[in-house]
Amino acid sequence: MNRREALERVALVMGGTIIGGAAFLQGCKSSDNKAAGFSLTKEQIAFLDEVAETIIPATNTPGAKAAKVGAFMNVMVTDCYEAKDQKIFTEGLAQIEESSKHLFSKGFMEISAEQRTSLLNQVNKELKAYNDTKKDTDPNHYFGMMKQLTLLGYFTSEVGATQALRYVAVPGKYEGCIPYAKGDKAWA
């Protein structure tokens, strides 16, 4: 079994809980629609780490940067996205950078964590407005892809699964009713 088949099966086992699961599955199939030689640069991966860290910051658990979500996004965009989505994704990086320079007169990597949060909140509002009017034939929004990959990359990483979620490597018997106290971590 190769990596694409494994990813397809994981997505199916998860019951399509991945947002846009159908697009995810279709994107991981062998296709001639992928850009030849596409890969993100080290600078773009570091940029994605910072975007992901803004979405899932370090608190009492490590953030997305500790899970190397930027590198994960590179693999997913390179291996699973069609050329049109790869283009939208990379143009989105440039749009975030441009918005940062317009709002704060500095690049995204140079602004404070509060400014990054403010900027990405504005981009998220654009995403919501786009999704409200989006038709099935419209392309994906770059920030939607970034958010989906951030969540998938973080919660399937060792850091996310073992430190942000409750993790049992080999679960015992099935217990249908387990006491839950407010503030407990979700199960991995």
Image (cartoon, rainbow, N blue to C red):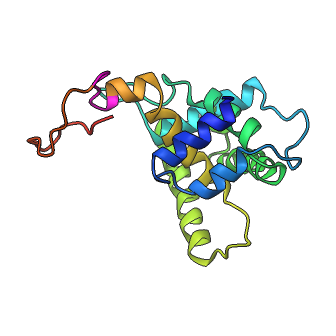
Residue 135: image quadrant is bottom right
- Residue drawn at (66%, 59%) of the image: 141
Would you say 160 lies left or right of 41 here? left
- Residue 39 percent location from the top left of the image: 81, 32
Would you say 163 lies left or right of 8 here? left
- Residue 172 percent location from the top left of the image: 21, 26
Image height check: is 85 above or below 169? below
Foreground pick, 178 / 78: 178
Instruction: Examine the rendering and report whether any part of residue 102 can be seen.
Output: no
- Of the 4 image quadrants, the one containing the C terminus is top left
Would you say 34 lies left or right of 28 here? right
- Residue drawn at (73%, 51%) of the image: 95
- Residue 174 percent location from the top left of the image: 19, 37
- Residue 41 percent location from the top left of the image: 78, 27
Foreground pick, 49 / 13: 13
Instruction: Examine the rendering and report whether any part of residue 149 can be seen.
Output: yes
Foreground pick, 99 / 88: 88
Residue 166 within the magenta-colored segment of the rendering: yes
Task: Give the dominant element type of the magenta stretch: helix, strand or loop.
Answer: loop
Image height check: is 39 above or below 139? above
Would you say 173 lies left or right of 61 here? left
Image height check: is 182 above or below 39? below
- Residue drawn at (15%, 45%) of the image: 176
Residue 104 within the magenta-colored segment of the rendering: no
Task: Magenta stretch: give its range.
Answer: 164-170
Number of disc labels:
0
- Of the 4 image quadrants, the one containing the N terminus is top right
- Residue drawn at (68%, 36%) of the image: 4
